[in-house]
Structures are given as structure tokens and as C-alpha cells.
Image: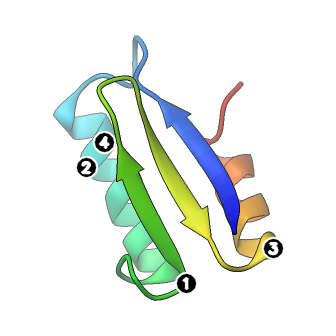
């Protein structure tokens, strides 16, 4: 599995920002349980991909700075 961590931080701490992020992920990769799974904490969200290339696309678009 290939993990991409997206932190809760200023500018990324609104429902609007997370709605946009999650909608993009669903449109790009489908619903969780297919090619990725998610984990939530109070500090970050992890997208755990089966495919290295999918994880790379996610990291480039939404990953840590």
C-alpha cells in the first residue's frame, strides 16, 4: 500500500476545502474501498492506495508541501 497524508492546516481546515479535495479523489479514483482506503485523525487524513502511480498523482495534487 502507498500512503498519502493530507494534513489539517490553515487554508485546508474548512469544510469547503475538504469537500473539494474528497470530490476530486472520488472523481479521479472512485469510492474508497476500490483502489484506495482512507484513515482519519484529528490532525490529518491518509489515503492508502494499492497502486504507486495513483498515490503519486494524489501526492502531486494534494500531498504535503
Farthest left residue in view: 15
> Crowding at label 3, few (<14), some or many (≥20) Cα neighbours within 10 Å?
few
Lower position in the chain sequence, tag 3 or tag 4: 4
Q: Are marks 2 and 4 in contact (CB under 8 Å)?
A: yes
Question: What secondary structure is marked by label 2?
Answer: helix
Q: Are marks 3 and 1 in contact (CB under 8 Å)?
A: no
Q: Which residue is mark 3?
A: 53
Q: Which residue is mark 4?
A: 18
Farthest bottom residue in view: 34
**Residue at the image position 39 percent from the left and 73 percent from the top:** 26
Residue mark closest to the camera, 3 vs 4: 3
How far apart marks 1 and 4 lie (CA) works out to 20 Å
Q: Are marks 3 and 4 in contact (CB under 8 Å)?
A: no
How far apart marks 3 and 2 lie (CA) works out to 23 Å
Q: Are marks 1 and 2 in contact (CB under 8 Å)?
A: no
The quadrant of the image that shows the N terminus is bottom right
Lower position in the chain sequence, tag 1 or tag 4: 4
**Residue at the image position 42 percent from the left and 77 percent from the top:** 27
How far apart marks 3 and 1 lie (CA) works out to 11 Å
x and y percent of residue 25 in the render?
Answer: 45, 66
Q: How many callouts does the rendering have?
A: 4
x and y percent of residue 9 in the render?
Answer: 43, 16
> Crowding at label 4, few (<14), some or many (≥20) Cα neighbours within 10 Å?
few
Question: What secondary structure is marked by label 3?
Answer: helix
Residue mark closest to the camera, 3 vs 2: 3
Lower position in the chain sequence, tag 3 or tag 2: 2
Amino acid at each position: 500500500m502507498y500512503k498519502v497524508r493530507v494534513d489539517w492546516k490553515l487554508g485546508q481546515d474548512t469544510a469547503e476545502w475538504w469537500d473539494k479535495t474528497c470530490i476530486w479523489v472520488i472523481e479521479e479514483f472512485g469510492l474508497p474501498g476500490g483502489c484506495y482506503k482512507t484513515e482519519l485523525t484529528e490532525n490529518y487524513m491518509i489515503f492508502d492506495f494499492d497502486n504507486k502511480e495513483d498515490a503519486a498523482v494524489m501526492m502531486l495534487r494534494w500531498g504535503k508541501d
